[in-house]
Amino acid sequence: MTVLCSVCRKETSRYTCPACNIPYCSLACFRSETHAQCSETFYRKEIASGVSLDSSKTTQEREKILGILRQLDDESLQDDGEFPHVSDDDDDESLEKRLAGLEIDSASADELLERLTNKERDTFFKLLRDPASALAQKLLSSTDLDKELQAPWWESPQFPIDDLDTAAIRYGHRPPLMEVPPGLKRWNPESPSLLYNMCSVFIAYAYVTRHLSMSPLCSPGNSRQDRREARRLIARAVPFIMDRQSKLLHVSLTDVITDVWARLGPGNINSRTIAVLLGDVSRLVRPRKVVVAEDAVGGVASAGALSSEHPRADALRVFSDMDALFNEDSTENGEQKKNYLSMKITFYAGHLLATPSLLLDALADETSLRSKSMNDEKKLVNTDTAIPLTGGTERAPSKIMKLP
């Protein structure tokens, strides 16, 4: 029997609230004002469990929460008129004073929340329910939080900079280039093109890099748990790269976007996120304009390891990073052993190097135009609350774009 959503009363329900047992259809309805009592309890529990976890990132996560709370207090964002106000006797007391004497490293989520005023708590939970709002994005993009994030390696400046240590912290390092057997670099115009399959892999790679703030994914500085999560997300977004029997062949950019977006979850990412990722793909796949010998169809003339100045070095680094990520545990008697996934990634890397430059430029143009189009559509819908994007087609970001 079909049951309507008890919140909007328009769509068919697909979920049941674990607290009050009402049926609802989407995350938006779960977060709605009429269901705030349950949803706020849920988020409070999530914060409590996240803050109380004894992991290497616990202190960092607490500091991020505190950073957001300080922003709420210092900037008085609730005075913008978007949120209803509740009078509070201790509004004039600064957050720093209210947190004085509290041991942050061992404090529970409830202890932190108790130090907030009523309207600060209301504002905090409203922002949690709508992380895509202009105010939430403003807090998440604050300078203090930005310092803790790591930007994708492909956004690292191409020219020398004075503080190399700071650059290494902010952008990580460019993945070393893998070796591709010469036999895989031969272009066969009669074979099906894997261009859009590669595009979907690049979207997944860019998403995971930004989402986990890991650059590159295979860096030894990343925890084992984070690298495992990176493998899980890539496998979910582009399962054909993992499936030995897969015969999936994407034939258009729309096909790619629809498939990857559905696998990552439309409720988790929005069109703004997809626009950022398409901008990343355009940047990565476009051959650089440098002088390196190539044959007539675009295949590399020389064999062996490629120069870091090769026109397709950045695109190859995507597959190189993935190969290292998925192949890190494949050792036997102290020697690296190629697994099936590694061989498949190597095959795609060879196809990349064999693809004529004109086709790669065309894909870069297509993804760039689609990124701009999605951004323009978003601006038309949210003219009053549009936020300047970084990580799109403009390549000089002042902020790090971390995806939800």
Image (cartoon, helix red, strand yellow):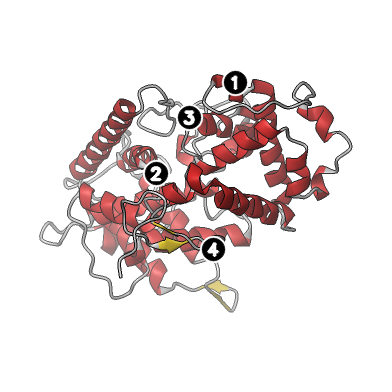
Q: Secondary structure at mark 1?
A: helix
Q: Which amino acid type is marked by label 4?
A: Pro
**Residue at the spot of label 3:** 134
The kind of residue tagged 1 is: Asp
Percent of width and height locating residue 311 = 33, 40
Residue 322 placement: quadrant? bottom left
Q: Nearer the viewer, residue 28 or 187?
A: 28
Label 4 element class: loop
**Most extreme residue toward the left, as rendered?**
190
Q: Residue at x 47, y 27 (%)?
A: 397
Mark 4 to mark 2: distance in Å?
A: 46 Å
| Quarter occupied by residue 335 | bottom right
Image side of residue 211 versus residue 12, left or right: right
Please give the residue where the numbered disc 1 appears in the rendered image: 79
Instruction: Mark 3 or mark 2: name the one nearer the start of the chain.
Output: 3
What number is the disc on residue 18?
4
**Residue drawn at the location 22% of the way across and 47% of the way down:** 253
- Point out which mark residue 314 bears: 2
Q: Check disc 2: other Cα within 10 Å, few if <14, some if 14-19, many if 20+.
A: many
Cα–Cα gap, marks 1 and 3 = 14 Å
> Would residue 352 be visible to someone looking at this image?
no
Out of 193 and 265, give the one closest to the viewer. 265
